[in-house]
Structures are given as C-alpha cells and as structure tokens.
Image: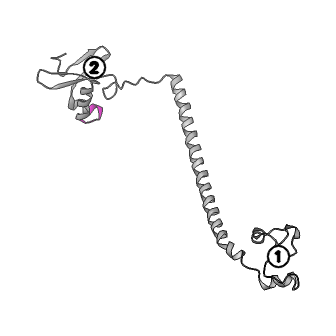
Amino acid sequence: MEGNAGMDTGGPAGDTQRVTIAEAAQMLGVKEPAIRKRIQRGTLEHDKGEDGRTYVYLDAGIPGGMDTGIPEPSAGQEERIGELKDQIAYLRDQLSEEREARRRADTIIAQLTQANATLAARIPELEAPESPEDASVRGAGARTTDTPEPRSTTEGTQEPTSRPWWQRIFGGRQ
C-alpha cells in the first residue's frame, strides 16, 4: 500500500481514504494522540509513506471517515431497545418512589424517637409519691403504716391514680 499518498484506494471493506494522522484526527473529531493510540492497538489500518509520514486508512462511506464497528440495529432490535428504555424509565420511577418512601419512614422514626425520649423524661414525674390529696381519698383509718396499699387492677376509675400511667397521659378509660 505504500506509494499511494494522497490517493483513495479501494479496500476490501469498500472505499477507503488514505490520510495523515493530523487529517484523521480532524475528520474524526479527536486529538492526534488518540489516533496514534488506535494505531498502537491495531484498530486503524495504517502504513508509512515514502516521505516517512504515517498514513491512516479511513472508510470513506461513514461520516467522519471511520467505521465504528457497531452495526446498525435491525427493526426487531430497535423495538427491543425501545422496550428496554421503557423498562429503565419505569425502574428509575420506582427507585425515586422507594427513596421518597424511605425518606418518609426515616422522618417518622425520628419523630417517634423524639416523642419516646420526651415521654421517658416524664416517667420520674409520673412515678412521684402520692400527693396528700390521694392519701385522704383512701381513708384515714385504712392503714397506719407507711407502706403503700396494694392496688387491684379491677378497681377501674374509682381513684385517678389507679389507672396505669400511660392511660393517664394518653387518655382513655379502662
């Protein structure tokens, strides 16, 4: 192939152009080192001219002068590509919905944690000793010792302190 500098030659894959590395880079829209690397990898056909310059052979039928090596998709492939793009769009939507649900769940967990800490701080306040008012309701002669009277869970709403602390805070009746 030497001796054909500046001439178009017919190659096995159709018409090809013999151009310098600088011209090939300009035609392909890349830099010269990229062309040299392609030559090193063996992805571009090339030869040395009589003038000592390296020439590259580019396919003249492809815009930009180079065969990309990727065949044009057939009608069935184009349909399949469209289906895959639809699936990708659907999965992206699902991902964004899941991220939003996760964000909401994290917000709820943070709020519940804060509420739990607030309630935990109130437990000592709720378990404080009985007020004198509660002691008078029980009756003066019921017991003379300082030990508290055992309470029945069946007493219901007779005494305000007979309900569990959580019912007194959140409301509700037995």
Q: Residue furthest front?
A: 145
According to the image, label 1 marks what residue? 149
Residue 104 sits inside the magenta stretch: no
Q: Secondary structure at mark 1?
A: loop
Q: Which residues are magenta?
A: 26-32
For the residues labelled 2 and 1, the Cα–Cα distance comes to: 106 Å
Q: Amino acid at mark 2?
A: Thr
According to the image, label 2 marks what residue? 16
Q: Quadrant of the C terminus?
A: bottom right
Q: Residue furthest left?
A: 51
37 on left or right of 132: left
Give the x, y percent position of residue 131.
77, 83
What residue lies at 60% left-to-right and 61% top-to-bottom?
A: 110
What residue lies at 51% left-to-right and 27% top-to-bottom?
A: 78
What residue lies at 86% left-to-right and 72% top-to-bottom?
A: 157
In-front residue for pair 131/107: 131
Give the x, y percent position of residue 96.
56, 47
* Disc with the residue nearer the chain's start (2 vs 1): 2
Give the x, y percent position of residue 169.
75, 71
Query: Is 153 drawn above or below residue 25 in the view shown?
Result: below
**Toward which corner of the image does residue 6 lie, by quadrant?**
top left
Q: Amino acid at mark 1?
A: Glu
**Toward which corner of the image does residue 2 lie, by quadrant?**
top left
Mark 1, Cα crowd under 10 Å, few <14 / some 14-19 / many 20+, is few
Q: Quadrant of the N terminus?
A: top left
Mark 2, Cα crowd under 10 Å, few <14 / some 14-19 / many 20+, is many
Residue 31 sits inside the magenta stretch: yes
